[in-house]
Image (cartoon, helix red, strand yellow):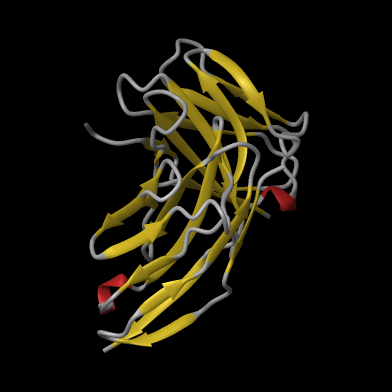
Amino acid sequence: DTGVSQDPRHKITKRGQNVTFRCDPISEHNRLYWYRQTLGQGPEFLTYFQNEAQLEKSRLLSDRFSAERPKGSFSTLEIQRTEQGDSAMYLCASSPRTGTDTQYFGPGTRLTVL
Amino acid sequence: GNSVTQMEGPVTLSEEAFLTINCTYTATGYPSLFWYVQYPGEGLQLLLKATKADDKGSNKGFEATYRKETTSFHLEKGSVQVSDSAVYFCAPQAGNMLTFGGGTRLMVKP
């Protein structure tokens, strides 16, 4: 069990550029989650996948954001036309199933939009 | 929607002091309750959890009891160490989503 991994760990971009982040969940975890954490705040839920199906999306996920999990394994989160307000830590988590199962978090990708 | 209220920090304690971090929540149904911890420079880690009323979660000397009647899940430790310095997050889970509180920063001085 190598844990949840995320790439890159840090990303600096200019306003208006597109960025893409990758998350590799713990193997055999069929559920994958994305959260966003701004400085000094707790993480906020963005979206959730069960296998390749995106089953839930937060209102925080504007139309500039898109997430995919094409083969039910790794996931990508893309932000188009980045804005300074997108600067945050983007966290990925995975769990074996829903209900009481624990979500295990990756180290996060810190995005800075200049 | 769900919400969480945590005591604001920072909480500064001397080593071996008693710790309480209060957490109250509002949620639909009967959520599972979690405490996560974030050490400096590291990712979120599960500290403990409780899945039904009156359950007590415990780990590394920390404890929290699921109090349905007061919708609370207060975190306690009898004797803190410098290595416990971190940010602690309370989070109910209803369905597939964790709802995090704002976090409480704990600073333990030798």
Q: Is residue B91 above or below residue B103?
A: above
**Left or right: A44, with A91 as reference point:** right
Q: How many labels does the image show?
A: 0
Q: Report which quarter residue B82 is drawn in.
A: bottom left
Position of the C terminus of chain B by quadrant = bottom left
Q: Tell me, yes or no, if residue A101 can be seen here.
A: yes
**Left or right: B73, with A57 as reference point:** left
Frontmost residue, A78 versus B80:
B80
Q: Report which quarter residue B8 is drawn in.
A: bottom right
Q: Position of residue B31 (x, y in %)?
A: 53, 40
Frontmost residue, B50 versus A107:
B50
Q: Is residue B24 above or below residue B94?
A: below
The residue positioned farthest toward the front in the image shown: B69
Q: Residue at x 78, y 28 (%)?
A: A63
Q: Where is residue A70 in the image (x, y as percent from the top left)?
A: 51, 12
Q: Where is residue A67 in the image (x, y as percent from the top left)?
A: 60, 25
Position of the N terminus of chain B by quadrant = top right
Frontmost residue, B78 versus B10:
B78
Q: Is residue B57 above or below residue A90?
A: below
Q: Tell me, yes or no, if residue A42 can be seen here.
A: no
Q: Residue at x 41, y 23 (%)?
A: A97
**Left or right: B19, with A3 as reference point:** right
Q: Position of residue B21 (x, y in %)?
A: 47, 71
Q: Which residue is drawn at 55% across and 38% down?
A: B30
